[in-house]
Amino acid sequence: MSLTTTQPVGIFDSGAGGLTVAAAVRNLLPEEQIIYFGDTAHLPYGDKSAETVRRYSLRIADFLLSKNCKVILIACNTASAAAFDAVVEHVNGKVPVINVIDPATEYVAANPKLKHVGVIGTKGTIGSGMYPQKINDLSPDKHVVSLATPLLVPMIEEGFIFDDISNAVVKKYLESHELKGIDSLILGCTHYPIIKNQIRKFYDFETVVIDSSQVVAQKLKETLANHNLLSTKRSGEHQFFVSDYSTYFKKLAEMFFEEEIDLQKVTLE
Ligand code: DGL
């Protein structure tokens, strides 16, 4: 069956982090209906094996297809690193699939001002080595260093933001010798834009802090346009699903979307 413009856009993450990407999509493409899935029962993905993250991701892809989505956007770096190829293979050409790593690495590779680039992300994302590899494939002269910062996702999901605890954790990580001398820092986890200003403040607003949500939303726009799938009129309310109910998730989603949301819990088999 062929796809139509009025079908929703499917977005997923392990939890609330992907809302940073979903909000950028909503701002850039207000006529698109979004269906968001946060796998809160299995969060964090960052310390799970690639095989486990793949298994979760394929289940979520099936869920989004069952909701009639016309595209799947993997709004999670860990799942993008571990499961993008598997999701593409699994959906077998039924819908286009977008990850968050390619748009970010293309953006950095194309920017000559960024020479000594740091990447922070989960253990899974950093361990995959994908950021340095993809940036250097496109632009071999860039010096790319990376650091796993595993405490940040649980900290953010627990609501420790803009306080002394999170400032201490951010400082401890960003002072690491791995990141010395960088001119730019990629937030290689979709949760991190939630604390972007804390990170910018650590650097006295001097180091370029790259939040890829906008370039990812732009990539989605191009992909939909290439498939003649851009919507011109929103066909329904945005919908939010989680695998485990979380009031924090609801609060964040309402903050990002500036509307009351009806959060639904679903169990994926
Ligand atoms: N927001 C995800 C990412 O970009 C999630 C991380 C996690 O669940 O550990 O990597």
Image (cartoon, rainbow, N blue to C red):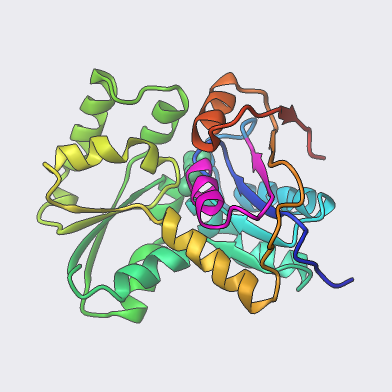
Q: Compared to 176, does 145 lie above or below?
A: below
Q: Residue at x 54, y 62 (%)?
A: 99
Question: Foreground: 9 or 164?
Answer: 9
Left or right side of 127 for 139 = left
Q: Residue at x 67, y 23 (%)?
A: 245
Q: x, y percentage for residue 216?
A: 48, 61
**Visible in this render: residue 47?**
no
Q: x, y percentage for residue 189?
A: 42, 48
Left or right side of 86 for 65 = right
Residue 263 image-quadrant placement: top right
Query: What residue range appears in magenta?
Result: 19-39
Q: Is residue 216 magenta?
A: no
Question: Foreground: 150 or 19?
Answer: 19
Q: Compared to 144, does 172 lie above or below?
A: above
Q: Residue at x 11, y 52 (%)?
A: 180
Q: Is residue 33 magenta?
A: yes
Q: Looking at the rendering, in which quadrant would you find the C terminus? A: top right
Question: Foreground: 3 or 101?
Answer: 3
